[in-house]
Amino acid sequence: MPLPETMFCAQQIKIPPELPDILKQFTKAAIRTQPYDVLQWAAAYFSALSKGEPLPVKERLEMPLAAKKKDAGLTPGLLKVLHKQLSSKGMVTVAELREKWKHLGLPEEQLGAILQLGSFGEEVEWMKFLALGCSVLGGSLLSSMKQACEILTRDPEGGAARIPFETFSFLYLYLASIDGELSKAETKAFLLGIKEQADKHSGMVLIRHFLPYSFIFY
């Protein structure tokens, strides 16, 4: 026989005091991130929360994605989430990267294509993976660098999107080697011009320092 249903009165039900705020923050995070698979993402969210790890949460809503109901692939917001979760490690295993990728509901084929392009083994140098992710988003070399600046900068949204010249140079040289369209002389000349600009701004590269070059090389 089924057990009789237990009846509770309001006085018997105790709500943990921290529960309302946890649910409120979770709801706001879900709305901001717009996960493709809410249940999968929620599991990753609460797992990270319990471990004190960076949450798989976008900083802001990406409006064009809000109306989409299925997997749309990598976005700047999602790549920034991955950067927050994995950049501190320097080197990450493909297995860990694949797990974080899956938590965000991103297509396995896209990850496979990036890993193949970078000729990575069982471990991935995160900054190189980030660069390739930016190339997926940007299309051209300089557009990819713009994406990188916007993801890596500590400036507020709408600011100059500054990053250190050393970081810019590393990412640019790596993407230029993958792209293979510019000669070493052209690459060297480009970075020399960027460094001259960066030296005037405490060693920081601004997007406006290199976007004009698109009219020369592209």
Image (spheres, rainbow, N blue to C red):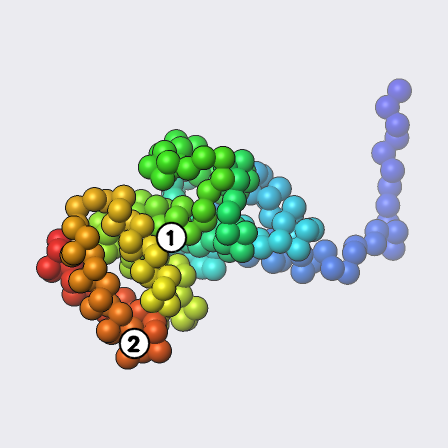
* Residue nearest the viewer, comparing 92 with 140: 92
In the rendered structure, which disc, 1 or 2, sits on the residue that comes first in sequence? 1
Mark 2: few, some, or many residues within 10 Å (few <14, many ≥20)? few
- Judging from the image, what secondary structure is the residue with disc 1 in? helix
- Secondary structure beneath dot 2 equals helix
Left or right of residue 206, residue 124 in this image: right
Q: How many marks?
A: 2
Q: Is residue 155 left or right of residue 14?
A: left
Which residue is the site of mark 2? 199
Q: Nearer the viewer, residue 118 or 215?
A: 118
Up the image or down, 58 lies above or below 202; here it is above
Q: Which residue is mark 1?
A: 76
Image quadrant where residue 147 sits: bottom left
Residue 154 in picture, x, y percent from top left: 43, 68
At 60% from the left edge and 44% from the top edge, which residue is drawn?
44
Whole-angstrom CA distance, mark 1 to mark 2, is 28 Å
**Is 14 situated left or right of 205 in this image?**
right
The answer to whether the residue labelled 1 contacts the one labelled 2, judged by CB atoms less than 8 Å apart, is no
